[in-house]
Image (tube, rainbow, N blue to C red):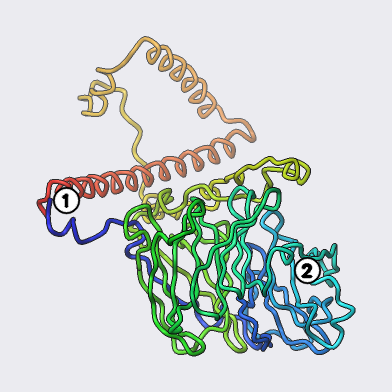
Amino acid sequence: MSFRRGVVRQSKFRHVFAQAWKAEHCIDDVRVSRVTWDSPLCAVNPKFIAVIVESGGGGAFLVLPIGKSGRIDQSCSTVCGHLAPVLDIQWCPHDDNIIASVADPGRGPHRAHDGAAVREWGSWPGTPQPSTSCSPQLADAHPDLIFSVCWNRDGSAVCTVSKDKALRIVDPRRGTVREKVHDGTRPMRAVFLSDGKILTTGFSRMSERQMALWDPKDLSEPIAVQEMDTSNGGDCTIRYFEVTDESPYVHFLNLYSSKEPQRGAGYVSKRGVDVNKCEIARFYKVHERKIEPISMTVPRKSDLFQGDLYPDTAGLEPSLLAEEWIAGQDAGPLLVSLSGGYATPPSKHRDTLRGRPKLPAQDSGGGAPTVAGAATAATTTPSATAAAVAKETEGEAERQARANPTDGTADRLKREDDILNDLLAEMKALRVVVLAQSQRIEILERQLARIEDGDV
């Protein structure tokens, strides 16, 4: 085994990089909320982007189309309904037109009347109207302020972190599990990963930022702990890691740095990334008065759809009804393929092939056959002979029609010739692309074989 193979970890995300979009694609003059609550302040789905904004006499947030850019007019309508400042917002995973917002009923001048802290909204054309409201039930299992809530993949449990430094796995139908995590008292967050593990972020007693990976079946000790740095305010850096089943389990990949610190960030789901550009993630960085998209891309030379970067992801259709879930059933999300969003790039040789002169008709005399013709004749089968006879009969009828054209026959034959030439040109261009990709695959396979043999 070579030394290089033992040092360099093989990963398809090893060369991932982040790049901010140009200024003309940013959203400017947004009155981002100045609330001190530790919140992303932004939520994104493939259709809309929502931002918590400043509002007098209550809480509000702004909903814009995902393709919106430029300056936002101060008179732009917002979603209002809370009597206290909005703390967090989240889009429904099964309907891109439904969003939930939450406010603290214990804050604001009308806290005694704002009994419903969570509201669900339908984003219809015009001014959105509240569809339902509900009171949170998770507070009964927490003696202190809740910082973060996240469902697992099959909907059987919820993980939470609260101000009492505890990570809890709450099963709404059975019971709870409680265990202490990060030692610091500053806000923490926890999310379920696709494989069922839990990833938490928080602080140590020395105010050092930490990231920990947990096994929900054994919360006595974390699987891995990643120490980062200290932070006294806004951060200008976005770090990205890869979680695997190999020790040390959490692998640092790269970081993105800018001059301005972020106040929050929204993360678009896999259904909203651009698969044609090998974009694996996209953040919407929240500045003081601006929203800036940042794309994370894995460079690839091939123009084909990269299936290894885009495994099937969760779609909009729910896997269970509410009655089935209450009855105790669990089910993972229904997955969809992202290949439907892939558009084949135009061929570089298409215009060149179309501009070439037409090939002259082959002479039926006793000329010597070409190599391709000899190879075709050598592999002829009885079924192929019958097809050739039928084709020759059709060709004879077409030649007679060309010799004695009627009123509309000449125009029809010309259109058919143009369509046939276009199809032939497209087929030749595709053959060139396939040949180039085959050669590239052979080169990569030889390089991989040398690495596995320890020659590199």
User: In the rendered view, does 378 fall on the left or right side of 92?
Assistant: left
Q: Where is residue 345 shown, x and y percent of the image?
A: 45, 55
Q: Where is residue 167 shown, x and y percent of the image?
A: 56, 65
In the depicted structure, whether residue 70 falls above or below residue 382: below
Q: Where is residue 160 shown, x and y percent of the image?
A: 61, 64
Q: Residues within 10 Å of mark 2 (few under 14, many from 20)?
A: many
* Local secondary structure at mark 2: strand
Viewer-nearest residue: 158 or 419: 158
Amino acid on which the number 2 mark rests in the picture = Val
Find residue 451 and name its label: 1
In the depicted structure, whether residue 343 falls above or below residue 230: above
Q: Residue at x 69, y 84 (%)?
A: 72
* Local secondary structure at mark 1: helix
Of the image marks 2 and 1, the number of the one nearer the N terminus:
2
In the depicted structure, whether residue 193 falls above or below residue 109: above
Find residue 118 and name its label: 2
Viewer-nearest residue: 182 or 420: 182
User: In the rendered view, does 172 fall on the left or right side of 227?
Assistant: right
Amino acid on which the number 1 mark rests in the picture = Ile
Q: Residue at x 51, y 29 (%)?
A: 402
